[in-house]
Image: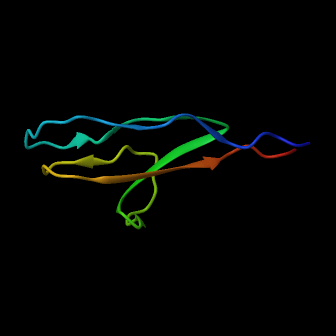
Amino acid sequence: MVLPNASITAEPTAKTLTYNGHEQELVTAGTVSGGQMLYALGDESGATEEFTETLPVGTDAGDYKVWYMVKGDRRAQ
């Protein structure tokens, strides 16, 4: 049996935030079909942290690089 690949149905979007001294989620969650959306903080060259399902947060003012990927979870039976 062939199943469709996992795919992004809505990409995560950056939030416009104002510094308040507290942790804030940096993006609005994306959605996927046939898998899980995973996020990680990083730099221009790629993720520098482990990918997790948890939305990345930041406290300090400044620019953040958020990387995302889809991990498929469908298997042929």
Model colouring: rainbow
- Residue 18, quarter of the rendered image: top left
Residue 65, position in %: x, y?
33, 54
Q: Is residue 74 above or below residue 41?
A: above
In the displayed orientation, state which residue is furthest to the front.
44
Q: Name the side, left or right, on which 23 lies relative to 12.
A: left
| Quadrant into which the C terminus falls | top right
Q: Name the side, left or right, on which 31 lies relative to 14.
A: right
In this rendering, the count of numbered labels is 0
Q: Is residue 30 above or below residue 38?
A: above
Looking at the picture, tell me which residue is in the foreground, 55 or 69: 69
Residue 23, position in %: x, y?
18, 44
Looking at the picture, tell me which residue is in the foreground, 72 or 13: 13
Residue 37, position in %: x, y?
52, 43
Residue at x 13%, y 42% (from the top left corner): 22
| Quadrant into which the N terminus falls | top right
Q: Name the side, left or right, on which 57 lies relative to 67.
A: left
Residue at x 13%, y 49% (from the top left corner): 61
In the displayed orientation, state which residue is furthest to the right.
1
Residue at x 40%, y 45% (from the top left corner): 54
Looking at the picture, tell me which residue is in the foreground, 67 or 21: 67
Residue at x 16%, y 48% (from the top left corner): 59
Residue 2, position in %: x, y?
88, 43
Looking at the picture, tell me which residue is in the foreground, 61 or 72: 61
Q: Name the side, left or right, on which 1 lies relative to 54.
A: right
